[in-house]
Amino acid sequence: MKKVFASNNLEFNDKLFDFVSNFKSQGQVFVDGDRNVIKTKQIEGVVVNVKSFRVPNVVNKIAYRFFRKSKAQRSFEYAQYLEQHDIGTPKPFGYFENKDIATFKESFYASEHLEVDLTYRDLTFDFNYPNWEAILRAFTRFTYSLHQKDIHFLDHSPGNTLIELNDGDYKFYLVDLNRMKFGPMDFSTRMKNLSKLTIHESMVKIMSNEYAKVSGEDEDKVFSTMWKETQDFQERFHKKRRLKKKLKFWKK
């Protein structure tokens, strides 16, 4: 198994590698999803979070073996990039890959496990959450800081930003990092980057107002573009879901 660590702490790294090597029998399940499994374990006083990525399909087994970086490697390298640019993300510890001479098998990404107060998704469910609007505005400023640093987080969705409240000194941490681009973004791309976050027009209005304040853009332009991108994303999302239901029906 290929192993890459962030630090030179040999004792910690050995225990981390043992956890990954025995992933099925060690640790506590945190997420047991269709695509990925996440487990946690305390190592040297630190709660470690290890994400096991689903074994790729036949095409990607070849692609990840010879042509593309694995999701685990990208997650690790992007986390290091975020750290270097003062963007919050759980501390990266390493990544691991199982592959043979011909194909790619499986990969793992290890990082610090953070206990936080909420995610952006919680804001979409509870409009009465204490300081709800202040948190939403702070999140918008955080997103603007990503854009200003040329960080295009492609999976900027409700569950992928963790939030610490810290008595009003809000801290934001990005997770699920394997899809990112880096480089200047035009106005349309920035607005589209905010389109997956909420279905609520009221939230888009607040985010538009705050984004206009910090960016200097016209607020009406920001809102109309962001809301259109949000509606377009929802239409594509539901169209895709309907298509999947039809395919499942015809497979029966």
Image (tube, grey):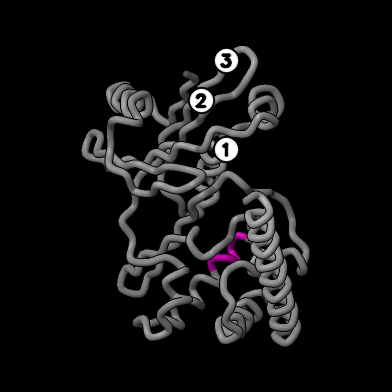
User: Please, what is the three-letter code of the amino acid marked with disc 2?
Assistant: Glu
Question: In this picture, is 84 found above or below 11?
Answer: below
Q: Residue at x 50, y 70 (%)?
A: 139
- Disc ID at residue 97: 2
User: Please, what is the three-letter code of the amino acid marked with disc 1?
Assistant: Lys
Place residue 39 in its image quadrant: top left
Q: Earlier in the sequence, mark 1 or mark 3?
A: 1
Which residue was labeled with disc 1? Answer: 71
- Disc ID at residue 234: none
Q: Residue at x 46, y 22 (%)?
A: 3
Q: Which residues are magenta?
A: 142-146
C-alpha separation, residue under disc 1 versus residue under disc 2: 10 Å
Q: Position of residue 89 (x, y in %)?
A: 46, 51
Q: Residue at x 60, y 56 (%)?
A: 155
Question: In this picture, is 194 found above or below 19?
Answer: below
Q: Position of residue 159 (x, y in %)?
A: 48, 61
In the displayed structure image, the side of residue 82 where residue 194 appears, left or right: right
